[in-house]
Image: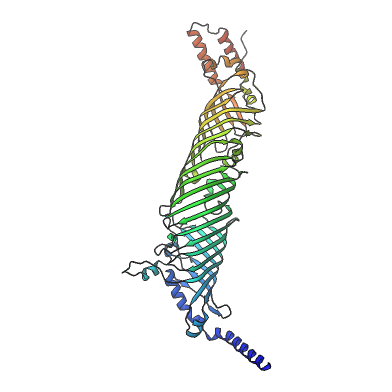
Amino acid sequence: MNRTLKIVGIVVAILLVIIIALPFVINVNSFRPKVEATASEALGRQVKVGNLSLSILSGTVTADDISIAEDPAFGKTPFVTAKSLKIGVELMPLITSKELRVTGITLEQPQITLLKTTDGKWNFSSLGGKAAEKSSAPSSGSSAPSNLSVAKLKVSDGKLIVGKANSTAKPHVYDQVNITVTNFSPTSQFPFRLTAKLPAGGSADISGQAGPINATDAAKTPFEAKVKVNNMDIVASGFIDPASGIGGLANFDGTLNSNGSMAKALGTFTGNKLQFSPKGSPASKTVVIKHAVDVDLDKQAGKITQGDVEIGKAVAHLTGTFKSQGEAQLVDMKLNGPNMPVEELQAMLPALGVVLPSGSQLKGGTLSADLSIVGPVDKLVITGPVKLSDTKLAGFDLGSKLGALSTFAGKATSNPDTSIQNFSTNARVAPEGTRADNLNLTVPAIGVITGAGTVSPAGALSFKMLANLQGGMAGGLAQVAGMGSGKGIPFSIAGTTSKPEFVPDLKGMAGDLAGNAMQGALSGGKLGGAKTGSAVDALGGLLGKKKPN
């Protein structure tokens, strides 16, 4: 027994000596020129590798200070730099014949810079291109890249920098990037998974199949993937120009498939704290968009074939096209929302930069809109008809606000709320402000108010209106100031959206009165007769004049 134990001990000691000595016996640094040359040829870029070291126990060769050169068209800063590269190798071929057979590659803490030109070309598009040209067989016309195959490729704790080539715009940084590829071969399909921490918080998890690698443009490599994104900051992640005023947090759960030239995205977008205007504030309600989008990668253009927008029980439908033009993103879309519950939309008004009179809110009824959305994302122009039906502006007494017209409108009807039977207008919302044409407001307790006007980006109001009053509002001067002829009472709305001011249009009133008086005289009436005279006297009182004795 003792003899057996001694033999076992000697064998173990010899093995330990071999394990310790082999790294010194096998000079793995002698492989460095070959590693650099092979990698450079495979990628079509200069690859530099630092000191190599061998670990027998783990069966890995470690290389320090890795760098992969950038495409010269994009600059001189390295495309990839990494703290270290671990290469799994088969030990027996390495020991017996000094042949390097790779089983796995792990790139640790790399920094990868992805740049895109205005015409859609990426800086990684040319990877492997030169190798493909050399390995192409003229007789077969094949453009297959290198026959390199690796059981597992990994990127561990990387940093991904995504930006625009030759641009002063700040790039977007994605941290804790981890990529795993199994059974990698550039000539066949291979499984992959990518996870990353997004700028300003959030996470992304993308998994699926990719390949074979496109030999002439790596960016056109086909793939099919499942995509899950949580709490992505829309602006910080670089998908929207900050100047557009659009922002918020997004979740996405769906699929993304590409054949290299055409891509299709299907899934559900869920938005929280969304904002759609530079003057807006984050919405308190969640927006869900079930969508289908086709993208032409060559033309950098796409089409939304399905865009069902849900805000609670309110549903609208978004369709249209988008494209890149230089650094600008242009859209041409339609948004149709028939009979949407107003109270569901109430929480979205601040996000759109819409401010109701202070202390008021909409209750009940429906809103319908058929809008055209065109132009650059940061300078959108939205036009189309908008209609409110059977709703109430609670907390706003329109009757008392029209009290400024009481001198010629009779006794103002007072009510803490304003019931709206109908409100319709042709709206135009643009960076320079909002315009409302063909405005028509029917308030049963007051009458019909028509007109047009503008709202400045700061919320200043400038409207010219005409009120056809009824009931208690239609008294006094209103009876002779044109209402009888259907002209109505002219007035203007100034102030701001949060504090509107209703101002009588005295010049318009005087014109109507003079017209009525002239009409009476021409028809044989007495200028200054009972009816006309009372109207002139009332106008004089409105202007601060005394009645003559």
Q: Quadrant of residue 228?
A: bottom right
Q: Residue at x 50, y 8 (%)?
A: 521
Residue 247, horizontal then vertical, whole percent: 56, 48
Q: Residue furthest bottom?
A: 3
Q: Residue at x 52, y 28 (%)?
A: 439
Q: Residue furthest left?
A: 139
Is residue 543 at least partly visible in the picture?
no
Q: Residue at x 63, y 23 (%)?
A: 403
Pick the front one: 420 or 119: 420
| Above or below 454: residue 276 | below
Q: How has the structure been colored for display?
A: rainbow
Residue 388, horizontal then vertical, whole percent: 56, 32
| Above or below 115: residue 132 | below
| Above or below 468: residue 264 | below
Pick the front one: 287 or 393: 287
Q: Residue furthest front?
A: 1
Residue 140, horizontal then vertical, whole percent: 32, 68
Pick the front one: 437 or 344: 344
Instruction: Tell me the quadrant of the picture where the C terminus can be found.
Output: top right
Residue 280, horizontal then vertical, whole percent: 58, 42
Instruction: Tell me the quadrant of the picture where the N terminus can be found.
Output: bottom right
**Residue 344 left/right relative to 294:** right
